[in-house]
C-alpha cells in the first residue's frame, strides 16, 4: 500500500488501486467502519465527485498533475488510520512553522529545490524523480490528528526539435498549489501565480462547452486556420512552420459569452458598443507560435 501511494502512476491511470488496497487493509485491520466514514467525509467535503477524488482535483490542477495529487488524499486517510509509513515525520515545531508560513510562501512562484531547501525533505514523495514530470510532496508529523500538507508541483516536456534533445517547460518542477486548509475541498488550496495561470478554465472542466482553435499569422488581416482541438492546431502549425497566435474561441460572440460566464463585466460607457464588441478578444487560452513551435 505504501508503495502504491508513492508511485501511483505505476498502478493505473485512476485511483482504483488506492481504493481497493485501502479497503482491503481496513478489512484486515478490522477498520472497515472507519474506512467507510472516511469515504463519506470525502463526499461531504466535495473531495469526491462522480469521477472520484481525481474529479475533484480536475478543478484545481492540469490533467497531467492529477494522478499523484489524487494519491495524496488517500495517503492522508492512511495516515489517520495508522497505516502510512512516512520517510520523515516533522517535529511539532517544524509542522507549526510550515502551517503558518505556507499560505504566504506560495504567493510567489516556487520550485522543487526551494520547497526542499525551505521545509526539508518531504514525509512522502509521490511520483517519480524525473524533473520533467509532475509530483506531489506531502508533509506530516507522527501525530495522526495532524492534517497532511501537500504541495503539488508541475512540469512537462517542452516542444523541441529532435536534434535539441529533451527539456522541460521549466528547468525543474514548479509549485502550482498547496493543500493546507481543513474543511471544504475547493477552499483547501492556496495557489502560486503559476498555479493560477495553469488552473483549468471553465471550458476545460466542462467538456460540453463548445470551442474551436483559430490561427492568425503575424501581420495577417484574416485567420488562416480553424481546428476542433488544440492538438490539431498545433500539429498543423508544426507541419507548416507558421508564426502567429493559436487562440481558443467559444461558439457565439466572444463578448456575449464572456459576459454570460462572468469573465467580463461592462463598466464603461463604450463597453457593449458596436466597435467594442467587434474588437472584443475571447479572453481564453492562446499560444504564441514561432516557426510552428510554441514560443
Image (tube, rainbow, N blue to C red):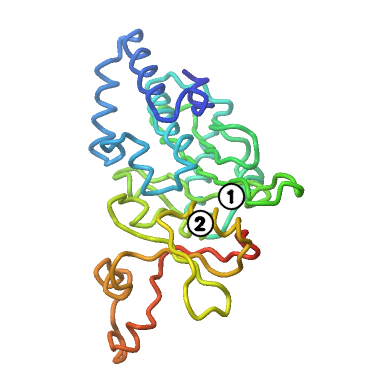
What residue appears at the point 33 percent right and 17 percent down from the top-left corner?
Answer: 23
Most extreme residue toward the top, as rendered?
28
Per the image, label 1 sits on a secondary structure element best described as strand
- Indicate the quadrant where residue 122 lies: top right
- Residue position for label 2: 192
Q: Is residue 163 left or right of residue 39?
A: right
What residue appears at the point 27 percent right and 66 percent down from the top-left corner?
Answer: 261
Going from N to C along the chain, the mark reached first, 2 or 1, is: 1
What residue appears at the point 57 percent right and 57 percent down from the top-left corner?
Answer: 109
- Indicate the quadrant where residue 34 lies: top left
- Indicate the quadrant where residue 236 lies: bottom right
**Quadrant of the rendering where the C terminus is positioned:** bottom right
Q: Residues within 10 Å of mark 1 (few under 14, many from 20)?
A: many
82, above or below 282, in the image: above
Q: Nearer the viewer, residue 8 or 139?
A: 8
Most extreme residue toward the right, as rendered?
163
Query: Where residue 206 sits: x, y (%)?
Result: 30, 51
Query: Where residue 192 sits: x, y (%)?
Result: 50, 56
**Dot 2 and dot 1 residues touching (CB under 8 Å):** yes
- Residue position for label 1: 174
Q: How far is the residue under mark 2 from the one under mark 1?
A: 9 Å
Amino acid at each position: 500500500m505504501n508503495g502504491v501511494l508513492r508511485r501511483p502512476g505505476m498502478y493505473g491511470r485512476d485511483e482504483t488501486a488506492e481504493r481497493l488496497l485501502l479497503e482491503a487493509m481496513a478489512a484486515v485491520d478490522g477498520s472497515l467502519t472507519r474506512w467507510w466514514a472516511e469515504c463519506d467525509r470525502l463526499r461531504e467535503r466535495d473531495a469526491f465527485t462522480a469521477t472520484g477524488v481525481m474529479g475533484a482535483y480536475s478543478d484545481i490542477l492540469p490533467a497531467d498533475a492529477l494522478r499523484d495529487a489524487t494519491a495524496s488524499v488517500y495517503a492522508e486517510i492512511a495516515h489517520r488510520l495508522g497505516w502510512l509509513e512516512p520517510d520523515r515525520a516533522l517535529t511539532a515545531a517544524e509542522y507549526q512553522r510550515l502551517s503558518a508560513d505556507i499560505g504566504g510562501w506560495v504567493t510567489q512562484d516556487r520550485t522543487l529545490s526551494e520547497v526542499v531547501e525551505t521545509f526539508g525533505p518531504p514525509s512522502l514523495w509521490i511520483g517519480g524523480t524525473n524533473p520533467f514530470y509532475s509530483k506531489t510532496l506531502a508533509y506530516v508529523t507522527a501525530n495522526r490528528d495532524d492534517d497532511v500538507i501537500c504541495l503539488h508541483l508541475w512540469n512537462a516536456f517542452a516542444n523541441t526539435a529532435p536534434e535539441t534533445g529533451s527539456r522541460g517547460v521549466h528547468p525543474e518542477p514548479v509549485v502550482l498549489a498547496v493543500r493546507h486548509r481543513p474543511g471544504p475541498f475547493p477552499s483547501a488550496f492556496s495557489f502560486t501565480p503559476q498555479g493560477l495561470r495553469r488552473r483549468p478554465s471553465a471550458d476545460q472542466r466542462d467538456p460540453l462547452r463548445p470551442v474551436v482553435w483559430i490561427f492568425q499569422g503575424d501581420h495577417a488581416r484574416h485567420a488562416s486556420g480553424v481546428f476542433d482541438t488544440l492538438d490539431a492546431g498545433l500539429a498543423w502549425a508544426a507541419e507548416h512552420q507558421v508564426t502567429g497566435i493559436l487562440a481558443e474561441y467559444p461558439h457565439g460572440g466572444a463578448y456575449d459569452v464572456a459576459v454570460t460566464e462572468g469573465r467580463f463585466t461592462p463598466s464603461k460607457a463604450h463597453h457593449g458598443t458596436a466597435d467594442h464588441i467587434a474588437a472584443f478578444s475571447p479572453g481564453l487560452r492562446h499560444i504564441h507560435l514561432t516557426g510552428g513551435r510554441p514560443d
